[in-house]
Image: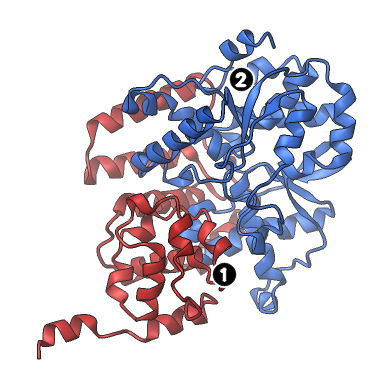
Amino acid sequence: MKVTYYPGCSLEGTAVDYAASIAGVTSWLDVELVELFDWNCCGASSAHSLNHHLALHLPARNLALAEKAERDMVAPCALCFNRLKAAEKALLSPEGEELGISYGGGIKIWDLLDYLTQTAFLEALAPKMTAPLKNLQAVSYYGCLAARPPAVTGKTDYENPQNMERLLKVVGASPLDWSFKTDCCGAGLAVARPDIIDTLVHRLYERALAAGAECFVVSCQMCQANLDLSQERISRKFGQDYYLPVFYFTELIALALGHPEAPKWLAQHLVDPMPLLKMKGLV
Amino acid sequence: MDNKVNQLMRPQISLAKQLTDASLAVSSCFSCKKCSGGCPLTFAMDVLPHQIIRLALLGQEDQVLGSGAIWVCSGCQTCTTRCPNGVDIAGVMDWLKEEAVRRGGTIPDEEVWAFHHFFLESIRAAGGRLSETRLLRRYSLYKMRRHPNLAELKQNLQLGWKLWKRRRMRLSGPPALRGQAQIKEIFRTGDF
């Protein structure tokens, strides 16, 4: 099955591990990702904070390119997905024609997690599990923008999404219930206001631990960065010794499939997941 | 009569209209405070989201445009999602940020503005995709000049080194796009 792939800028930089795990997993699931030709940055939070023209026209160019490719498009980054959907909404609105961009909404824009947790994929995945992640206690952390606002994303289960939990069950892990799965990690404030990240992420660590979690599972590279890169700093600041590895959902699929490359991607995390996986007898 | 007070309180009635014109009507707000109740960032805000909406409606421009809250908002969209009256509060926050910059006053959380500014500048300079390394370099230089914090700089350099060792940070920028001219035009028409 072929689908257009919009990786987004981080996946060429700080989230190369996510990119590699996506490439690794999709090839095992008979999904062929065709990278969108000549894609550009969606503008992210910075465009919608400072310049609404850029916030609309940067993602709109990608939509026009994607429609020409005549395939649905997946975006692994929640923010890219959100900006693409927001531009789509503007282009398809009654005033959209005045923007002079050729896009008729003939393709569907998917958030990668949604795409890979369609029932057909989960059913196909189940018999392929060679190394189920038995007894791995995980909280799903969806973050904000894959789901909110529903008027843009088109999601119905935006307060309590469940598809990552369904996936975790298929790969043999134990998804835990908790109330912070769509709470904000601070996202793009990470550089300018790390103090804010510290407060928000510290709360997520505490709530995850209270739920009995041994790790986080994420589907957004910004969430991964804030939970993973700040862990040492937050531990120091709050006088705790947090150890909560932060997996991409694609990495867990790969581990459960017995993908030989998975340890290589995990070695790129700052919080090394290996001690946890060894303790659980999963590697 | 204290003219100074009257001056301060004089409403700029155009503010609510400007927001309505930008498809961000605030007039249906009945101050239920659901936005502030769900906002994860209130701990860092000087004015709460429902107060921003109310003050905007009352035309208190200086208070909303000069607030730190609009810069602390992470755009998580919880408020917009939950508003029972369909007010796009996060959208209002963005509009206010842009307007505050346009008017050229003092920005309380200048670092946040600077980060966003260098982010966009780095997309433009790299020809269409973000160069994370350029962004961090430009932002760090700005920070050293305006608000030097050696401890934070040291921490960031250490983090950069750890990422580089793990190949999550690269020195070369992204490839320039075939559609560079289109990107340039988008930035030009957006006055950036």
The reply to the same-chain question for discs 2 and 1 is no
The mark found on residue B84 in the picture is 1
- Please state the horizontal and vertical placement of residue A114, each as a whole percent of the image: 75, 44
The coloring applied to the image is: by chain
Q: Is residue B132 above or below residue A137?
A: below
Badge 2 crowding class, 10 Å Cα cut-off, few under 14, some 14 to 19, many 20 or more, is many
- Please state the horizontal and vertical placement of residue B126, each as a whole percent of the image: 51, 46
- Please state the horizontal and vertical placement of residue A150, each as a whole percent of the image: 65, 60
Residue A109 visible in this rendered orientation of the protein: yes
**Which image quarter: residue A124?**
top right
* Residue at the (45%, 49%) spot, across then down: B119
* Residue at the (62%, 49%) spot, across then down: A80
Q: Can you tell which of label 2 and label 1 is closer to the viewer?
A: 1
- Please state the horizontal and vertical placement of residue A265, each as a whole percent of the image: 63, 21
Q: Give the farthest residue toward the bottom.
A: B1
Q: Secondary structure at mark 2?
A: helix
Q: Judge from the rendering whether residue A31 lies leftward or rightward of residue A233; answer left or right.
A: right
Q: Chain of mark 1?
A: B
* Residue at the (51%, 29%) spot, across then down: A210
The kind of residue on which mark 2 rests is Leu
Q: Judge from the rendering whether residue A198 lies leftward or rightward of residue A68; answer left or right.
A: left
The kind of residue on which mark 1 rests is Pro
**The hue in which chain B appears in the rendered picture of the protein:** red
The mark found on residue A266 in the picture is 2
**Which image quarter: residue A89?**
bottom right
**The hue in which chain A appears in the rendered picture of the protein:** blue
Quadrant (top left, top right, bottom left, bottom right) of the C terminus of chain B: bottom left
Q: Is residue B60 above or below residue A34?
A: below
Q: Judge from the rendering whether residue A174 lies leftward or rightward of residue A272; answer left or right.
A: right
Q: Judge from the rendering whether residue B67 lies leftward or rightward of residue A210; answer left or right.
A: left
